[in-house]
Image (cartoon, rainbow, N blue to C red):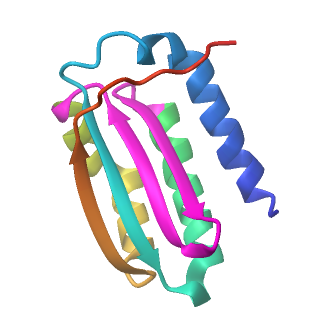
Amino acid sequence: MSIKQPLILRAAVLTLCLCGPALTQETQGQYVQLAELEIDPAQLESYKAAVLEQIDAAIRLEPGVLVLYAMSEKDNPASIRVFEIYRDADAYKSQLESAHFKKYKATTEKMVKSLKLVRTDPLMLGAKAK
């Protein structure tokens, strides 16, 4: 496990601690999607560093970004999924226009072999608060 992976885990835990009670409440109006990415395996470590930086900045700087979880498939580490929850569609649009997101997109442009965004309707989101 690289040093970057515990940082992502800590960011996810912090988000759950801060947003957990809110996640079990009203989800109407939230913008929720799943990003499915295939990364060039030769550039996977560089991609992980870039997504860590992006998620850290988004969670820290953007109040409308509620949850960003990046994970890879156990048997195919270059297959990445990012679970995203935003306060609303405007918060999502704001994220896309942020300097840190634009840096992430420019940095990872040649690392990402494919990207599919899947808009979702949450049935129930739950998390335990500490």
- On the image, the x and y values in percent for residue 62 come to 40, 32
User: Residue at coordinates 52% horizontally, 33% vertically from top-left?
Assistant: 60
Reply above or below: 5 against 110.
Answer: above
Helix, strand or loop for the magenta stretch, by majority: strand
Q: Does 103 appear in magenta?
A: no
User: Residue at coordinates 40% horizontally, 84% vertically from top-left?
Assistant: 110
92 left or right, relative to 22: left
User: Residue at coordinates 47% horizontally, 42% vertically from top-left?
Assistant: 68
User: Residue at coordinates 17% horizontally, 32% vertically from top-left?
Assistant: 90
- On the image, the x and y values in percent for residue 87 come to 29, 25
Q: Check the picture and name the quadrant holding the C terminus.
A: top right
- On the image, the x and y values in percent for residue 11 come to 63, 37
Which quadrant of the figure has residue 56?
A: top right
Reply above or below: 100 against 125.
Answer: below
In this figure, what is the number of numbered marks?
A: 0
Which quadrant of the figure has residue 58?
A: top left
Reply above or below: 98 against 42.
Answer: above
68 left or right, relative to 32: right
Q: Does 67 appear in magenta?
A: yes
Reply above or below: 129 against 117.
Answer: above
Q: Which residues are magenta?
A: 61-89
Closer to the camera, 30 or 95? 30
Q: Check the picture and name the quadrant holding the N terminus.
A: bottom right
- On the image, the x and y values in percent for residue 21 come to 50, 10
Closer to the camera, 35 or 104? 35
Q: Residue furthest bottom?
A: 42
